[in-house]
Structure formats: structure tokens, C-alpha cells
Image (cartoon, rainbow, N blue to C red):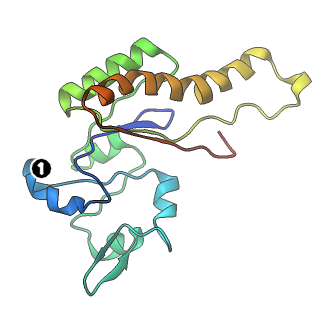
């Protein structure tokens, strides 16, 4: 769900294009959660990316929930802080450049939550801002380990289970800063 380098595991409970709200009553405590990082929160704050629609309500964006639904809206800088605020959340920190550590984190997640239905690779690091001839080779390799190897390692750790369950989704994002 959360780690220091921005990668996340999220338990998926339904096909988002097939009325997931109908499956909320089947969830523990009849609840479902949407976790968004800062970039996604910004995206879902304006047209065309709305969080939900409802008859007579039109489109609902993140600021609408913040303003009108404090009973369901929680905000925190990390999943750990969200859990500390009283909201249900679990944090799984892992060095995504360490395959064995990622496998252990996935195993802990699946023991606590259940099968991994979706992997979201959301961020990386920009690295140093130097010319090529001034950049230390180890600084360059660190950027590659996190931005290139990290998503590969996370995919390698979850894809076999996704194939076995005949379902899974992987979302890969990037930015100009990492």
C-alpha cells in the first residue's frame, strides 16, 4: 500500500468499469477505499477525471468529497499517517531494488489483505542534476536501480500470482522528475 519510494500495492475488489459500488456491500464492514497519492489527487480534482457520479449529482471531484463528505474523506501525507489518524490503513515499506525484500513484502500484504489484484508503480527519483561527464557512475546506477529495476522487480514479484488467479492489473506511471 505504501513505501518510501512511491510504489504501492492495493487490494482490488471489483472491475472498476463494471459498477464496483455494487460490490461494496460484499466487503468487510461494507466499506471500500480509494487511496490517491498527491499526483492522482491533483488529477482527480478537475474535469475530465472525476471520482464518481450519481443521479442528480453530476460529477464529483476530490474537493467535493473534502468539502461535503468529511464522514468519508480522510487525508494524510502517508498511509502510515492515515492509519494513525484512525482510518483503516496498513503500510508496507520496502526497498524496491531488493527482489527478496519485495517478495517478502508481497507475502506480508497477501497474508494480511488477500491476493494482489493491482500493482501501481507510481514514482521514481530524478537523480542528480549534473552534466554527463560530472555524474558519478554510482549516482547514475542508483537512478536506474530505482526507476528501471524497481518496477520490473515489483512486477516480477506479483505477476505469477496474478496469472494463477487469472486476474491482475499493473499501472505504470512516470514523470519528468523521476
- Residue in the picture at 55% in, 44% down: 173
Q: Nearer the viewer, residue 62 or 52?
A: 52
Q: Left of 162 or right of it: where is 72?
A: left
Q: Position of residue 156 (x, y in %)?
A: 44, 22
- For the point 26% across and 72% down, which residue is it? 69
Q: Identify the residue at the far right of this view.
A: 133
Where disc 1 sits, the SS reads loop
Above-or-below relation of 18 to 152: below
Quadrant where the C terminus is found in the figure: top right
Q: Pointer 1: what residue?
A: 27
Q: Quadrant of residue 163?
A: top left
Q: Who's the residue at 50% across and 72% down the image?
A: 48
**Is 172 displayed left or right of 90 in the figure?**
right
In the image, residue 161 sits, relative to residue 90, either above or below, namely above
Q: How far across and how far down the image is residue 29, in percent?
A: 8, 51
**Toward the viewer: 76 or 98?**
98
| Residue 1 visible here | no
Residue that lies at the very extreme toward the top in this rendered image: 100
- The image shows residue 96 at horizontal and vertical percentages of 48, 23
On screen, residue 30 above or below 70? above
- The residue at the far bottom in this view is 56
Tell me if residue 41 comes above or below residue 153 in the rendering.
below
Count of numbered circles on the image: 1
Q: Quadrant of residue 140?
A: top right
How many residues crowd mark 1 within 10 Å: few (<14), some (14–19), many (20+)? few
Q: Which residue is at the front of the view, 7 or 154?
A: 154
Amino acid at each position: 500500500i505504501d513505501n518510501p519510494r512511491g510504489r504501492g500495492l492495493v487490494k482490488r475488489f471489483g472491475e472498476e468499469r463494471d459498477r464496483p459500488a455494487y460490490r461494496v456491500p460484499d466487503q468487510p464492514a461494507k466499506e471500500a477505499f480509494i487511496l490517491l497519492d498527491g499526483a492522482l489527487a491533483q488529477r482527480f480534482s478537475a474535469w475530465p477525471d472525476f471520482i464518481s457520479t450519481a443521479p442528480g449529482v453530476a460529477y464529483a471531484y476530490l474537493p467535493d468529497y473534502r468539502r461535503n463528505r468529511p464522514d468519508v474523506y480522510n487525508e494524510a501525507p502517508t498511509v502510515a499517517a492515515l492509519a494513525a489518524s484512525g482510518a483503516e490503513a496498513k503500510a508496507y515499506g520496502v526497498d524496491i531494488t531488493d527482489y527478496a525484500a519485495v517478495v517478502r513484502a508481497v507475502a506480508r500484504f497477501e497474508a494480511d489483505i488477500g491476493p494482489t489484484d493491482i500493482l501501481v508503480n507510481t514514482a521514481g527519483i530524478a537523480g542528480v542534476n549534473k552534466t554527463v561527464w560530472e555524474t558519478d557512475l554510482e549516482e547514475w546506477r542508483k537512478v536506474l536501480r530505482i526507476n528501471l529495476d524497481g518496477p520490473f522487480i515489483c512486477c516480477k514479484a506479483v505477476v505469477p500470482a496474478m496469472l494463477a488467479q487469472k486476474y491482475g492489473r499493473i499501472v505504470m506511471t512516470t514523470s519528468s522528475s523521476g
